[in-house]
Amino acid sequence: MMSDTVWRMDSGVVFNIQRFSIHDGPGIRTTVFLKGCPLRCFWCQNPESQSGRPEIVFDRRKCTLCGACYAACPHGAIALEAGRPVFDRRICKGCGQCAVVCPSEARRLSGTRMTVEEVIREVLKDAKFYENSGGGVTLSGGEPLAQPEFARLLFKGCKQAELHTTLDTCGWAPWPDIEKLLEVVDLVLFDIKHLDASMHREAAGHDNLLILENARKISKLKPMRIRVPLVPGFNDSPEAVSAIAAFVKSELGSRDIDLLAYNRMGEVKYDFLEKSCVPLPSQSEDHLRMLESILGGQSAVPE
């Protein structure tokens, strides 16, 4: 199946392979999360996905002050001050040596460079689940189109193995990259976060003009579901959801819309990366039901 030897030379950075996913497309799926994203959404629940390179996440609560990381780091990114390790991310190369020797797993490498063959080998371990449930493989992130050729080759391998393929995308990517990837995509899960361009730019780092134009183009070529990550105070108002629903109906045709309920599980990850986080409340069940009623009763699903 993987006889094309050039694929062995192609690799990308993967930060998670999640088995038994049931919210990332039809059936039981394996979701492969690729690192790198062009957006900087202030609510991002996977902040470790934003950078395209491997990086260390550090849970200081687990640190036993053993000093093994200091001794193992070949780049001098860890110093000892008063017996405590001090980590300089500007120097860190993401080699992961400190994580390898950490006895308490306080340090972990987020992101591993894998070949297409290695990833395909992993996802094929669950082939029986796909066959019995109508599932397959989903590429998510981060943003899969931040690594467009790696994503294309992954899906090409999946199609050769007769697996269903789903692309989970924020939509902010050059159209030629999207068009080429769509050749090996069965379903697109497409994020629409807000229809107001200036609000989108302030919240995510880019406006939504390219995103909405790409949504229009994809809707003419592939089956797609629209996903709206509900963010408290940003887009979880009746007005914002109604505007998205109206756009989808008028511009994209009849499409299912999934409302993704906000959860706070990702907030602790910011501390692991020594980044600041905007704490947000979770939506109440009553509020979610009200938003669902705008879409005719479609249920919100976990993000």
Image (cartoon, rainbow, N blue to C red):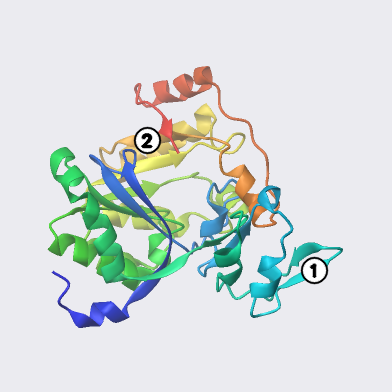
Query: Which residue is at 16% across, 42% downward?
Result: 134
Q: Is residue 90 left or right of residue 211?
A: right
Q: Earlier in the sequence, mark 2 or mark 1?
A: 1
Mark-to-mark CA distance, 2 and 1: 48 Å
Tag 2, which secondary structure? strand
Label 1, secondary structure: give it: strand
* Image label count: 2
**Residue 144 can be seen in this image:** yes
Of 85 and 268, the residue lying toward us: 85
Residue 124's spot in the image, x, y percent? 21, 56
Is residue 72 shown left or right of residue 285? right
* Pointer 2 residue: 258
Three-letter residue code for mark 1: Leu
The residue positioned farthest toward the right in the image shown: 82
Kind of residue indicated by mark 2: Asp
Q: Which mark is residue 80?
A: 1
